[in-house]
């Protein structure tokens, strides 16, 4: 999709490729979903490192995103013990 491509396209001018990538989608690339831009395609363009760990999750984002957010909150709980968000 467009937002992912904007992020990945910046890697063509960035000094280093990504070490990790997770793609949450309902659209398989074989049927034209993802505009054919799988994470393997990103690797072939140098947007992901050759040894980058990556996963594509084919499921509804209303199911997968809350799971990802809950896992991130659990892992970061010790950094923000009062539950407040980080200040930038």
Image: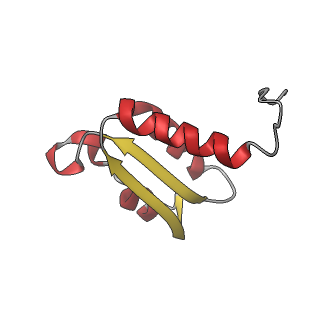
Residue at image position (51%, 42%) is 68
Q: Position of residue 70 (x, y in %)?
A: 56, 39
Q: Of 74 and 45, which appears nearest the observer?
A: 74
Above or below residue 63? Residue 45 is below
Q: Of 85 and 4, which appears nearest the observer?
A: 85
Q: Position of residue 11 (x, y in %)?
A: 58, 50
Residue at the limit of the structure toward the front, as seen here: 82
Residue at image position (56%, 37%) is 69
Residue at image position (40%, 32%) is 2
Res. 63 in view: yes
Residue at the limit of the structure toward the bottom, as seen here: 51
Above or below residue 29? Residue 33 is above
Above or below residue 57? Residue 4 is above
Query: In the image, is 78 to the left or to the right of 6?
Result: right
Residue at image position (74%, 42%) is 77
**The quarter of the displayed image where residue 63 is located:** top left
Query: In the image, is 60 to the left or to the right of 55?
Result: left
The image's colouring method is secondary structure
Q: Position of residue 19 (x, y in %)?
A: 60, 62
**The quarter of the displayed image where residue 72 is located:** top right
């Amino acid at each position: 999709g467009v937002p992912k491509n904007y992020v990945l396209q910046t890697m063509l001018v960035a000094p280093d490729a990504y070490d990790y990538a997770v793609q949450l989608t309902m659209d398989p690339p074989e049927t034209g979903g993802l505009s054919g831009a799988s994470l393997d395609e990103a690797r072939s363009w140098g947007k992901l490192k050759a040894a980058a760990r990556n996963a594509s999750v084919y499921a509804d984002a209303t199911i997968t995103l809350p799971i990802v957010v809950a896992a991130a909150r659990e892992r970061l709980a010790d950094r923000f013990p009062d539950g407040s968000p980080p200040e930038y």
